[in-house]
Image: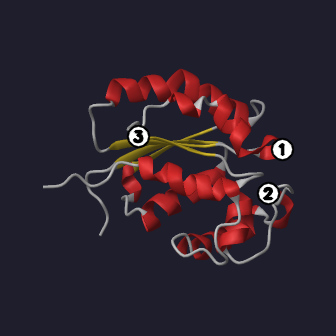
Amino acid sequence: MPSRRIRVRVWCEDSEHEAFARCLLADVFGIERRAIDVNKAPDGEGAASNWVVRRYQEEVVPTYRRARHQVGLGFLVLVDGDNVGFKARLEKLKADERAPDDRIVLLAPTWSVETWVLWLDGEPVKESESTKDRLPPAEFRTRLKSAIARWTTPPQGEKLPSLANARIELKRLPTEPRA
C-alpha cells in the first residue's frame, strides 16, 4: 500500500535518473508517485553532475535544514560517480557532514545508473568500466521495471560497492509515522 504521508524531493542529472528514482521510490518504498518532486539538471548548461553538486550545496542542505521538522519529508540526491567513483562523489558532497538522522539520501552509481540497472537485470558489469553505451535510453526504460523488481533480491550477492552503499543510504528515507 502506498504511503500517503511520505514525500521525497529528488535532485538528479537526467531523465534516466528521474525514471530510476521514481520507480525505486514508488515500487520498492511505496511512496506515491505524486509525492515525488523531481528537480532535474537543465539540458545544455554544462556537466549535469556539477549542477547536482551545486544544487546540493546551495539548495538541498539549506532547504532540508528549514524543513527538518517535517518528519515525512525526505531528500534524495542522485549523481553519477562517472570516472571518479562513488566515494569521491560522496566526499565532494561532504556526505560525512550529515547528522546520522538527516533524511538526505546520497546515491552515486559508478559509472552511471545504467550500471545498476544492468546488474540488477542479471548482466555482468564492472564498476571500473562505463556501461552507458550498453544501455541506450529506449532499452533503459524497458529494463528498468524488471531491474527494480530485483532490488530486494539481488541476482548474485552484492558485488557493486556503489549499490551496496545505496542500500545503506536509503535507510535515511523517512518511514511511515506510527499511529
For label 1, the SS is: helix
Q: Is residue 137 above or below residue 57?
A: below
Res. 29 image quadrant: bottom left
Q: Is residue 179 visible?
A: yes
Mark sitting on residue 127: 2
Distance between mark 3 and mark 1 Cα atoms = 27 Å
Q: State which tag comes first along the sequence, 2 or 1.
A: 1
Q: Residues within 10 Å of mark 3 (few under 14, many from 20)?
A: many
- Amino acid at the residue labelled 2: Glu
Image spot of residue 41 (x, y percent)? 65, 37
Residue visible at 51% across and 49% down in the picture: 169
User: Are the residues flagged by discs 3 and 2 in contact, CB closer than 8 Å?
Assistant: no
Disc 3 target residue: 103
Residue visible at 51% across and 61% down in the picture: 24
User: Are the residues flagged by discs 3 and 1 in contact, CB closer than 8 Å?
Assistant: no
Disc 1 target residue: 83
Residue visible at 38% across and 54% down in the picture: 34
Image spot of residue 4 (x, y percent)? 26, 56
For label 3, the SS is: loop
For label 2, the SS is: loop
- Amino acid at the residue labelled 1: Asn
Q: Is residue 27 left or right of residue 174?
A: right
Image spot of residue 168 (x, y percent)? 52, 53
- Amino acid at the residue labelled 3: Arg
Image spot of residue 88 (x, y percent)? 73, 37
Distance between mark 3 and mark 2 Cα atoms = 27 Å
User: Are the residues flagged by discs 2 and 1 in contact, CB closer than 8 Å?
Assistant: no
Q: Is residue 42 visible?
A: no
Q: State which tag comes first along the sequence, 3 or 1.
A: 1
- Image quadrant containing the N terminus: bottom left
Residue visible at 71% across and 78% down in the picture: 122
Res. 176 image quadrant: bottom left
